[in-house]
Image: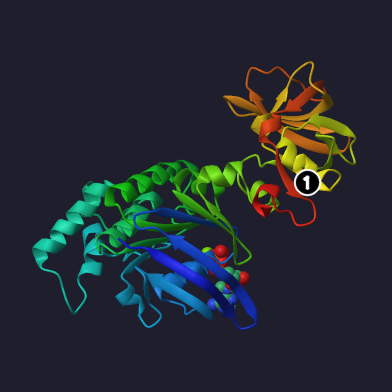
Amino acid sequence: MAHIELKNITKKFGGHTALTSLNLEIADGEFFVLLGETGAGKTTTLRLIAGLEKPTEGQVLIDGVDVADWGAAERDVALVLQQYSLYPRYTVRENLEFPLKPKIRRLPDAEIKDRVDRAARTLRIEHLLDRKTDRLSGGEMQRVSIGRAIVRKPRVFLMDEPLSALDAKLREALRTELKNLQMQLGATFLFVTHDQIEAMSMGDKVGVLNHGRIVQTGTPQEIYNNPRDTYVASFVGSPPMNLIDGKLVNGRAVMAPLNFELPFSGGAKASAATDGRPLVFGIRPEDVYLESGAPVEARVHDVENHGVEKILTLRVGDTTLRATVPARTDVAIEQPVRFAWNPDKVVLFDKGSGVSLRHAG
Ligand SMILES: Nc1ncnc2c1ncn2[C@@H]1O[C@H](COP(=O)(O)OP(=O)(O)O)[C@@H](O)[C@H]1O
Ligand SMILES: [Mg+2]
C-alpha cells in the first residue's frame, strides 16, 4: 500500500506538452480514477509514476519519498494495460508464476504456489489454471493479467483502461469485480479511463484531465453535482448536463436568445453578484420535469426509451434540452409540452471562462 503524490508535473515530448503543472494526490488504499478523453495525458501520467518516463518538471513522490532516481523495478508498482500481454503457449498457472520467478531473489516454491492459488481464487480463475492462455476468452485473459499484478503484491496498482477492449456486459461485470478486489486487497489503485460511467461507478475519487491539465478532483458526487466548469459538466453524466445561455434578471433566469424565463433560487448572493452578466445555466436532465402548468412551452423533438425512464429531447425555438422522465410519461414526437426545472439544482457558469460561479469563489 502506498500514498502517491504528483507535484507540479510538466511533461513535454519535444515541442509537445502532454502534461501541464499537474498536481495529484492519491491516498493510501484509495481507488482513484483519472478520467479524460483520448490524448488527455492519462497513459503519460501512469508511465511517470511507473518510472517508464521522466517528468520534464516536477516530482513524483511515493510514500513521501521523491522517486526520481528509482528505476521501474524499485518503485514496486504494477501496470495493467488494455492489451493483455500473456505468454500464449504457457498455462495460466505458468503466466501467474513468471512475475515471481526473477533470476535474482526468487521466492520459495511454497510461497509462489500460495500466492498463485490465492490470486486465482480471488479472481475466480482457479478452474483455468492448467489451461493455455490462448484458449481463454477476453474477460478471462484480462483476469489473468490482473492476476499477474496481484501475485507480486505491489505497493500500487496502475490500470490503463483495462476494461476498454471488453464487450459491454463483461466490462460491467469486471467493473464490480475490480472494485471488490481493490477493497479486499486494501490496495492503492490508480485507474485511468475515458469512460465516465466507469469513473463514476468505481472511483472513491475522480480526477478529470483535459489537455494535460487536471480540471477538477473530487468524489463522483461532487463532480456530478458541482462540476467546476462547463467541460466537466458536459463530460460527466449521460445524457450530459443541459447548458443554456442566459442572464439573471431580478432573481429569474432569462434565456437570452430564446426569451424564456424560469424561476431561480440560487440565493441572494448569486443573483446580486451576477445580475445582467452573461451566464450559462446548467441543469441535469433529471432535474427538468414536465407539468401542465409549468412556465415554458416546448415541443417533443425526440424520445428515447430506456426501460425505467425515457429521455426526451425538448425543443424551444432552435435550442434543445434533455429531460429524463418516468417511462410511464406518455408523449409523442412534436407534441407540445410544458416544462420547468428544479431551481435548487441549477448550476451557474460564467459565459466567458466556463467556470462555475461556485468554484470561482
Ligand atoms: N512518446 C511520445 N512522444 C511524443 N508524443 C507523445 C508520446 N507519448 C504521448 N505523446 C502525446 O502526449 C499526449 C498524451 O498522450 P497519452 O498520455 O497517451 O494520452 P491518453 O492516454 O490520455 O490517451 C498525446 O497528444 C500524445 O500524442
Ligand atoms: Mg492512453
Counting from the top left corner in percent of width and height, residue 222 is at 55, 45
Q: Is residue 256 above or below residue 91?
A: above
Q: Is residue 109 above or below residue 347?
A: below
In terms of depth relative to the viewer, which is nearer, 318 or 224?
224
Name the quarter showing ligand 1. Answer: bottom right
Residue 290 visible in the picture: yes
Residue drawn at point x = 55 percent, y = 50 percent: 195
In terms of depth relative to the viewer, which is nearer, 115 or 352?
352
Residue drawn at point x = 82 percent, y = 23 percent: 295
Give the quarter of the figure containing the N terminus.
Answer: bottom left
In terms of depth relative to the viewer, which is nearer, 215 or 158?
215
* Colouring convention used in this rendered image of the protein: rainbow
Kind of element beneath mark 1 = helix
In terms of depth relative to the viewer, which is nearer, 320 or 109?
320
Left/right placement of residue 54 relative to residue 338 reads: left
Counting from the top left corner in percent of width and height, residue 220 is at 52, 45
Residue 82 visible in the picture: no
Q: Is residue 222 above or below residue 82?
A: above
**Residue where numbered disc 1 is placed:** 273
Q: Count numbered badges in the picture.
A: 1
Counting from the top left corner in percent of width and height, residue 70 is at 35, 80
Residue kind at label 1, given as amino acid type: Ala
Residue drawn at point x = 34 percent, y = 44 percent: 180
